[in-house]
Amino acid sequence: MTITNDSEFKATIAKLTKAGQRQVGARFAESVLALCKDARVKHAIATAMRADITEDELAAAFDAAKKASVDSFTQCGVECDWHSQAGHFVAEAALACLKPGTNPAWEAAMHARMARTSESIATGIGTDNAETAVQYRILAEFMKD
């Protein structure tokens, strides 16, 4: 399977179960994890990837990701620090794949892309939509499993 655009990407995501969306969303978040130094986010992503997650573990990971997201938002400050902003979007990506609702994988993907964009602003290096291509590959590989 090859995914070449966001229409195919969204259509493929829509075919996944809720658990599948959570797991692939966690993979999207993991691809930008290096931009976030919060151990709670790392743990939440690792938990979200598990196929055997219990409802209690899911709730605990959601709470941890939520707290990390709130904390990272307040660290961005009035004068935006783009590195901190990138970390915040990683936390939001982790939160997206754990929260109840529709399209957790799509939401996680969008936050991961925003994290990469924030990083590119901080470093002055363009992304050339590189994260989008990474996500297409991640989803295609996930669908093979």
Image (spheres, rainbow, N blue to C red):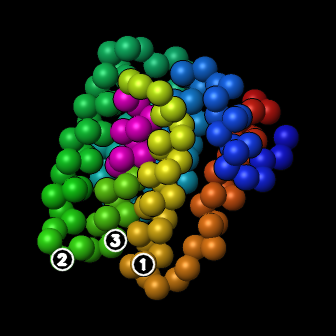
Give the residue at the far front of this rendering.
Answer: 7
**Decide: marks 3, 2 in contact (CB < 8 A)?**
no
Q: CA distance from mark 3 to mark 2?
A: 12 Å
Q: Amino acid at mark 1?
A: Ile
| Marks 1 and 3, the one that precedes in the sequence | 3
Q: Is residue 56 magenta?
A: no
Q: CA distance from mark 1 to mark 3?
A: 9 Å
Specify the quadrant of the image occupied by residue 57.
Answer: top left
Q: In terms of secondary structure, where does tag 2 sit?
A: loop
Camera-side residue of 20 and 103: 103
Camera-side residue of 141 and 129: 129
- Residue linked to disc 3: 83
Q: Amino acid at mark 3?
A: His
Boundaries of the magenta span: 91-99
Secondary structure mainly formed by the magenta segment: helix
Q: Is residue 93 magenta?
A: yes
Q: Position of residue 17 (x, y in %)?
A: 60, 20
| Count of numbered labels shown in the rendering | 3
Residue 34 in sight in this render: no
Which labelled disc corresponds to residue 79?
A: 2
Q: Position of residue 123 (x, y in %)?
A: 44, 82
Instruction: Classify mark 1: residues with Cα within 10 Å, few (<14), some (14-19) or many (20+).
Output: some
Specify the quadrant of the image occupied by residue 106.
Answer: top right
- Residue linked to disc 1: 121
- Residue drawn 29% across the image and 66% down it: 84
